Amino acid sequence: MSEKWAKKLSSECHIKSDVLQSLLEELSESCYADSTTSKKSLEELTLRCNFNEAELRKFISEVSKNCPVDARKLQKEIVDAEGNKEEAYKAIVKAGSRPF
């Protein structure tokens, strides 16, 4: 299922499908998220925020560093960023469970 999803998204955002699958897995593990929530987050980051592969990798790395992160809250905050990359990055802190 995620392979088909990755191929479809790849054709829309021009990021290799195997990279998307890998990032999906990492995001799901970092956030203890279901794949549906993680997929929505990646779709939002690639299609609305226009993240390229390097930016996606950096974003997912930051999510991993800030574990645990509430996946649903992260996805909501990414949507609330309304395509703004800087605001999307702030979503990591907003969704983090660790106090700063």
Image: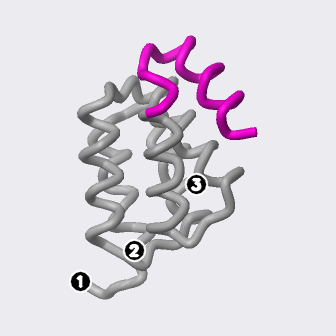
Residue at image mark 1:
100
Q: Quadrant of residue 83?
A: top left
Q: Quadrant of residue 34?
A: bottom right
- 22 or 86: nearer the eye? 22
Is 54 included in the stretch rendered in magenta? no
Q: How is the image coloured?
A: one colour
How far apart marks 1 and 2 lie (CA) works out to 9 Å
Image marks 1 and 2: residues in contact by CB distance under 8 Å = yes
Location of residue 38 with respect to 71 vertically, above or below: above
Q: Residue at x 36, y 34 (%)?
A: 84
Instruction: Tell me which amino acid carries mark 3.
Output: Lys
Other-residue count near label 1 (Cα within 10 Å), few / some / many at <14 / 14–19 / ≥20:
few
Residue at image mark 2:
96
Instruction: Tell me which amino acid carries mark 1.
Output: Phe
Other-residue count near label 2 (Cα within 10 Å), few / some / many at <14 / 14–19 / ≥20:
some
Left or right side of 9 for 92 = left
Circle number at residue 12: none
Instruction: Tell me which amino acid carries mark 2.
Output: Gly
How far apart marks 1 and 3 lie (CA) works out to 20 Å
Location of residue 69 with respect to 91 vertically, above or below: below
Say whether disc 1 or disc 3 marks the residue closer to the N-terminus: 3
Image marks 1 and 3: residues in contact by CB distance under 8 Å = no
How far apart marks 2 and 3 lie (CA) works out to 13 Å
Element under label 1?
A: loop
Other-residue count near label 3 (Cα within 10 Å), few / some / many at <14 / 14–19 / ≥20:
some
- 46 or 26: nearer the eye? 26
- Image coordinates for residue 3, horizontal then vertical, percent: 65, 33
- Image coordinates for residue 94, horizontal then vertical, percent: 39, 67
Circle number at residue 76: 3
Range shown magenta: 1-18
Farthest-out residue, bottom: 99
- 34 or 41: nearer the eye? 34
